[in-house]
Image: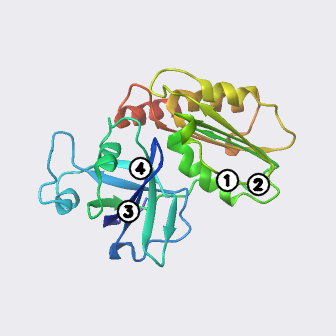
Amino acid sequence: MPRISRTLTVLRRQNLTPNMLRLTLGGENLEGFPEGQESGYVKLLFPKDGETKMNSGIKGVLTGTKPRMRSYTIRSFDPQALELNLDFVTHGDNGPASAWAMKANEGDEIAINGPGPTKLVDHTADWFFLAGDMSALPAISVNLEQLPSDARGYAVLEVIEESDIVELTCPVGIDVHWIINSHPNESNSPLADKVISLAWQNGRPTIWVAGEFNAMRAMRKYFKQDRGVAKNDIYASSYWKFGATDEGNKAAKILDMG
């Protein structure tokens, strides 16, 4: 991804649901940020482990030792207002990004890199299957909004509680299923179980699944091995791993690809 670092300011914070927070970042440093990057990501920059202060503030993160980076989906970008919306799951604060987001106030600064490439489904497919937990909800929402009006298929979304269910903009042919999992940090598989239970449709599908590592791997295996979906028609990514740090999740992803 482009290594363009920008220092942005928190303009607004909005609690979308009990477990989802939206931060609007902005400032003149967003000038030149490319349009049409929704579903792509930016990397938030934080001090390394053990560093409690950012040296001389944001400049310390940008000029000091290599910072920790956390990827977050671009939910929306307004080039006229120079505003970037990022959504954060606030169930727990084990990582630097969620901890920062839960405490962030208007006027606080954060450094970002990016954007990274978009993650959109293939619109030439006959039908669509999207699935993920709350960490994937921003990217899935973008995908659903951009589907052709005659699109058909499924969207399976796992949330922590019923109040986390949000209104989606998507074609009427997309059958939306909400799964409540009040213990997302425990080893369980309600998302994958629901995905596997749904009737298979006719034609060539395009698959988009993301979320917890083990659930993602189970869904990918189902689509690839049980349903024979071609590798190029499957996008599967783990955004986090039960019982592991972000670094642990990245290491597991590398091993899984091997």
Mark nearest the camera among 2 and 4 is: 2
Tag 2: amino acid: Pro
Tag 4: amino acid: Ser
Query: Secondary structure beneath disc 4?
Result: strand
- Disc 2 and disc 4: Cα gap in Å? 28 Å
Q: Are marks 2 and 3 in contact (CB under 8 Å)?
A: no
Question: Residue 230's spot in the image, x, y percent?
Answer: 73, 39
| Label 2 vs 3, first from the N-terminus | 3
Q: Mark 1 points at which residue?
A: 144
| Label 2 vs 4, first from the N-terminus | 4
- Disc 1 and disc 3: Cα gap in Å? 25 Å
Q: Name the residue under label 4.
A: 71
Mark nearest the camera among 1 and 3 is: 3
Tag 3: amino acid: Arg
Q: Mark 3 points at which residue?
A: 12
- Residue 120 can be seen, yes or no: no
| Label 4 vs 3, first from the N-terminus | 3
In the picture, measured across the screen, residue 159 lies left or right of residue 147, that is left
Of 205 and 139, the residue lying toward us: 139
Of 47 and 134, the residue lying toward us: 134
Label 1 CA crowd tier, 10 Å (few <14, some 14–19, many 20+): many
Residue lying at 53% horizontally and 37% vertically, measured from the top left: 211
Query: Secondary structure beneath disc 1?
Result: helix
Q: Do the residues labelled 2 and 1 touch (CB within 8 Å)?
A: yes
| Label 1 vs 4, first from the N-terminus | 4
Mark nearest the camera among 4 and 3 is: 3
Q: Mark 2 points at which residue?
A: 171
- Residue 31 can be seen, yes or no: yes
Question: Residue 155's spot in the image, x, y percent?
Answer: 69, 42
